[in-house]
Amino acid sequence: MELPAFTPAQESLFLTLGGRALDSRLPHPFLGDTMADEVLGRTGYDLTTLPPLRTRSPDARTKVFDIAVRAKRLDEVVRGFVARHPDAVVVDLGAGLDGRIFRVAPPPTVDWYDVDLPEVIALREQVVPHHAHAHVISADVTDESWLDALPADRPAVIVADGLIAFLPQDGVVSLFNRLTGHFPGGELAFNAYTTVAVWATTHLGSYAAIGGAVVNPGSNDPHAPERWAPALKLVEEILLTRAPELAAMPLSGRLAARAIAWNAWLSRMSGTSVLRFRF
Ligand SMILES: C[S@@+](CC[C@H](N)C(=O)[O-])C[C@H]1O[C@@H](n2cnc3c(N)ncnc32)[C@H](O)[C@@H]1O
């Protein structure tokens, strides 16, 4: 199909979609999202144009581990929340072409909102299968008004997978305050970007296609969002250097993770983490 001319921030959705698609082709996938591969196929996007998915490692597991396992952790946050709150609202911020609702399979009493920029939502509607309880919202998440369309009287679980790096810091602060003010209570979970991760995406040649779109300065303190939005309370920091799925990684990956997993700061600064907050 003819793909729209995306901005680098929008184009980044192919990195995460592609990572999940490649994961699903592994003999023993970490996430196993075969729909990601189908959606990717419908777009006709050429993954070889994305250097981070073309690492020199001959073993595909090392390319997809972070993307697949962080998606799995975020799925678990949503699945756990909707099991406890069957009347919940789920909000996936910067959803891209992710079919998370199909992986989570929430009860039919849940309403699910996938939010992304209009150009992305237009493509999403062509290539991601429709789900009876899913709604799409075409909006810049930092805009003030899109939340008005969502119910304000139900508990909410809000996730952002691969989004925060593309938002200016004042946009993140006001977004978190608006989210926690809109819903009576809930959870917010996202993969964090440290200053090291931001430096890497903005300076390493392999991220040149999207690095220019990274505007967030990053944060090295998992408690920092509690200061940005006082309603937030950190529940857990999930460090992927300690993920049980590492047991299925090649020896080099297991040894590298083991060398830093003992220390939370090292794990945070050199690996992927998911932060889960209650409000
Ligand atoms: C790395 S992709 C992740 C997509 C999806 N969450 C996934 O895991 O495949 C980042 C997504 O954030 C979206 N995005 C970036 N800035 C945004 C903004 N200000 N408002 C809404 N979406 C935004 C992009 O369009 C893109 O789809």
Image (tube, helix red, strand yellow):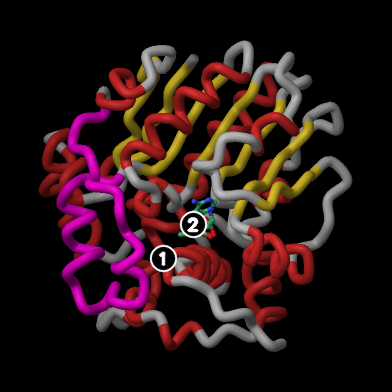
In reply to whether residue 221 is colored magenta, the answer given is yes
Q: Out of 62 and 184, give the one closest to the viewer.
A: 184
Q: Residue at x 84, y 27 (%)?
A: 109
Return the residue at label 1. 64
Q: Check whether the beta carbons of the residues at disc 1 and disc 2 lie within 8 A of each other.
A: yes
Q: Is residue 142 left or right of residue 155?
A: left
How many marks do you count on the picture? 2
Q: Would you identify the image quadrant in which residue 224 lies?
A: top left
The vertical placement of 68 against 44, above or below, is: above
Return the residue at label 2. 30
Sort mark 1 into few (<14), some (14-19) or many (20+) by Cα contacts within 10 Å: many
User: Residue flagged by tag 2: what amino acid is it?
Assistant: Phe
Q: Out of 247 and 2, give the one closest to the viewer.
A: 2
Specify start and end residues of the magenta stretch as a single range.
193-222
Sort mark 2 into few (<14), some (14-19) or many (20+) by Cα contacts within 10 Å: many
Q: Out of 153 and 250, give the one closest to the viewer.
A: 153
Q: Residue at x 17, y 58 (%)?
A: 199
Q: Is residue 79 left or right of residue 196?
A: right
Q: Would you identify the image quadrant in which residue 147 lies?
A: top right
Q: Quadrant of the N terminus?
A: bottom right
Q: Residue at x 43, y 13 (%)?
A: 231
User: Residue flagged by tag 1: what amino acid is it?
Assistant: Val
Q: CA distance from mark 1 to mark 2?
A: 8 Å
The vertical placement of 272 against 250, above or below, is: above
Q: Position of residue 220 (x, y in %)?
A: 18, 37
Q: Point out the tag, 1 or 2, that comes first from the N-terminus.
A: 2
